Image (cartoon, rainbow, N blue to C red):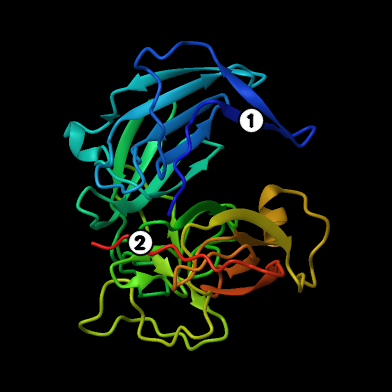
Amino acid sequence: MHRLLPLLPLAAAASSSSSWSQVSITQADNGQQPPPIMSAITGAFANGTQFLLFGGCTSSCCFAPIDAQWTLDLTQDLTQGTWSKRIPHSGSLTAMSAVPSARFGAASTVDSTKDILYAFGGQDSSQAFLGDLYKFEARTQEWTEIKPSIFSETSTLSFQRPPAPRAAASLSVVRGGVGGGLEGGRGQEKHLVLIGGFGRQGAKEDEVWGLKLSGTGRQMENGWVRLVPSSSTDVREVEEGKEEGTPSRSTSRGLPARWHHVAVPVKIPKTTPSPSSSSPSSPCEEGRGQKDALVIVGGSDATGQDHNEALLVEIDWEEGTYTWRVLAAETKEKEKEERSRPPVRQ
């Protein structure tokens, strides 16, 4: 069961001293600040001076998620803040159709270079799993629903059906390309990476997805591509009758099932540098000497058991594959209590 924690008082991490400090909220409870909330869509913008909170649950059972939106404006030193309740609005002429519905458990991430938040999936008030994708632009305060393409004319990977609806996954912004190489050596293109989660058929094993963040408007240039474990057989099509997002290949060597985990994008050096490589002289050349990776921390497995190990997932965009290994093993306490968190089912 999730622990319901109050949002106030908040705490901010001071990167220079690696310590925590309490954030002082300047106004009294005037209806502008949120109630205690969990499993909401969150993101920080403007170098951490603005914080977004959307949706989530105000009770541990999550039978009544909300669609309200709040913003916390912080001072430059991150010591004081003021909450304000906002009415979510859309940049589309069709208005509310592009604003997320009430939900909890959505995966969210922020592209800090553009101050854009992305959110995927979650669960609604009926506990049904969602598979839609939205973006929130902090500079305009507008929501837009993104509808990725089903097929791509340029990608060599044909398996591009959208990920199955899910909650409690992780979503990250990384750089690189999905399938078909780096397209002219532009290794600095941004992509979303969706990992794990929990859906109608249980926890998601071997679920690593990539989506190219290019194109304009609500239609993306590329669709979702499911990355293949490099040690398993590459099967590029979905068998008839299978749920969308379910591959026909064996997933026994893929990433273990994880949900309610944390994913942090990192860059690691390539193990075999190019023979003609030299000191990088541009961001693109620097990108060619590095590999995209994510550190996965904690989460629950398919049985609901919690874990505290750290996994490293390395992505090979040119091959459309990934590898993973244990970065930090779980701590085994002498009398470790086996905790089980039964998943919320429809």
Where residue 292 sits in the image (x, y, percent)?
62, 61
Among the two numbered marks 2 and 1 on one chain, the one whose residue lies closer to the N terminus: 1
Q: Residues within 10 Å of mark 1 (few under 14, many from 20)?
A: some
- Mark 2–mark 1 Cα distance, whole angstroms, equals 37 Å
Rendering quarter of residue 148: bottom left
Residue 251: x and y in percent read 46, 83
Q: Quick one: quadrant of the C terminus?
A: bottom left
Q: In the image, residue 209 lies at what x, y percent?
A: 44, 65
The residue singled out by tag 2 in the image is: 223
Residue at the right extreme of this rendering: 279
Describe residue 116's horizontal placement relative to residue 16 as left or right: left
Q: Which residue is mark 1?
A: 12
Which residue: 52% across, 75% down? 256
Rendered position, 156 above or below 217: below
In the rendered structure, which amino acid carries the disc numbered 2?
A: Gly
The answer to whether residue 226 is above or below residue 230 is above
